[in-house]
Image: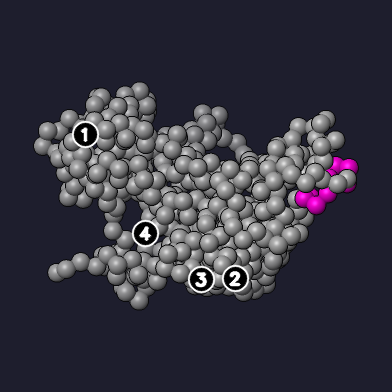
Amino acid sequence: MFRPRTLSILMEELCRLPGIGEKTAQRLAFYILRTPQERAQRLAQAIVEVKEKIIFCSRCRGITEADPCALCTDASRDGGLICVVEDPSDVFLIERTGVYKGLYHVLMGALSPLDGIGPDQLTIDALLARVERGGIREIICATNPNMEGEATVLYLARLVKPHGIRLTRLAHGLPVGGHLEYADEITLSRSLEGRRDI
Amino acid sequence: MALYRSDAFVLRTYKLGESDQIVVLFTRDYGKLRVVAHRNRRGHSRTASYYQPLTRLHVIAYGRPTRSLYQTHSVDIAQAFRVLHEDFNLLSCGLYMTELIDISTQDRQPAPELFALFDEALEALAGAGQVPKGAPASVLTTRQHERQRVTPPMVLRHFEISLLTLSGYALQLSECAHCGGELPPGACGYNARAGGLVCDTCAATRHTLKIGHAACGYLRGMMGHVPLPEMLPDTAAQQEMERLLHLHLTTCLGREIKSYPFLYL
């Protein structure tokens, strides 16, 4: 099929993005083609800058432009509380709730015995170093509720419990606005176990 | 279009697109089947909790026999083995067995004996996590006095030996695996290429792993060559058995087992 070389290159690059197929890539490429020059340049500049300026925070391993990140240096946040998440994007999900006021630690993945992803490939050592420095009273494990997430939580429990720190994990339960009849047995049983007083 | 109705274990899952998953199932009647679980990675999926390793399901799948991916018509949990998900040691052991089953089986090649072995081993492992409360008897531990043997490492050793035997890679323990001669009565050498214990003459010219008398005796007992000793072997003998079986497994299966290091974390 005839297509200008530059347009083909743009489409190929767009196709590499998650959730973008060939048709969507073509639609986006033509949108970029039609868009004013300065807007296209702002998009290109934003992509270049995000790659150049974003670094990982040396304390929490979250993404930031300045090290340490704004969350780690915010004096109003509770320094005794650490929320452990798998990916940097999870930090923003939890921040969106507006409920959590502690610090974070990003593991950069989860333990996966079946894929051979062990503790050495995660930032568990850095978390332990933070624990050993003291001042932490609770660690909240906000890993995904799947086998990898469970393995990570159980492994962390083994390492953190001897330090006398409270270790908790996010509740498993029914989604708000859902219906009981559509809940599966495992979620329902965990909801019952995790019931709370009113 | 064919319909596949069977009990199945979840071996592993792969991401498919934005929100779907490919689930590798080990079915009792049809061997390994790969099914597509649509929208399984979204929070409101009803079946997301079903498709976790170490879960036994009742599955009805359908699809063309010539295709490699199937669709699920219905799925229900038969057993969740929750105790295995609550202890890191037990979880590691369970996932190690899951990986061994995954490596040793082929797509659409029925292996009901392996299915039964995996089922019994997971039951025994779940029981090992509850020994003080009275573990359920299983084929691996039929006699009352054998309950003391239901420790996670010994469940793994039984599982490894049975898996090797059922896969056609049984250890040669009754005679020299190289020359067929008589084995010495005490400690022996194990040679991976020969596939079993070797006599002193053959061991002199080959790289061998030294296996003590107690470990040799217990291995022979587990394979049914001699009655199983009443008492568990000591820690040193258990370590020898573990090293031998790991070497034999990696040699026979031709690859490292990714979940093996997790047994020692």
Q: Which residue is mark 3?
A: B136
**Which sits earlier in the primary sequence, circle 4 or circle 3?**
4
Residue sitting at x 81%, y 31% = B204
Q: Which residue is mark 1?
A: A134
For disc 1, the chain is: A
Q: Which mark is residue B143?
A: 2
Type of the residue with mark 2: Arg
Q: Do circles 3 and 1 both sit on a common chain?
A: no
Q: Is residue B52 visible?
A: yes
**Tag 2, which secondary structure?**
loop
Contact? badges 4 and 2 (CB < 8 Å) = no
**Which sits earlier in the primary sequence, circle 4 or circle 2?**
4
- What residue range appears in magenta? B172-180
Q: Quadrant of residue B231?
A: bottom right
Q: CA distance from mark 4 to mark 2?
A: 45 Å
Q: Which mark is residue B43?
A: 4
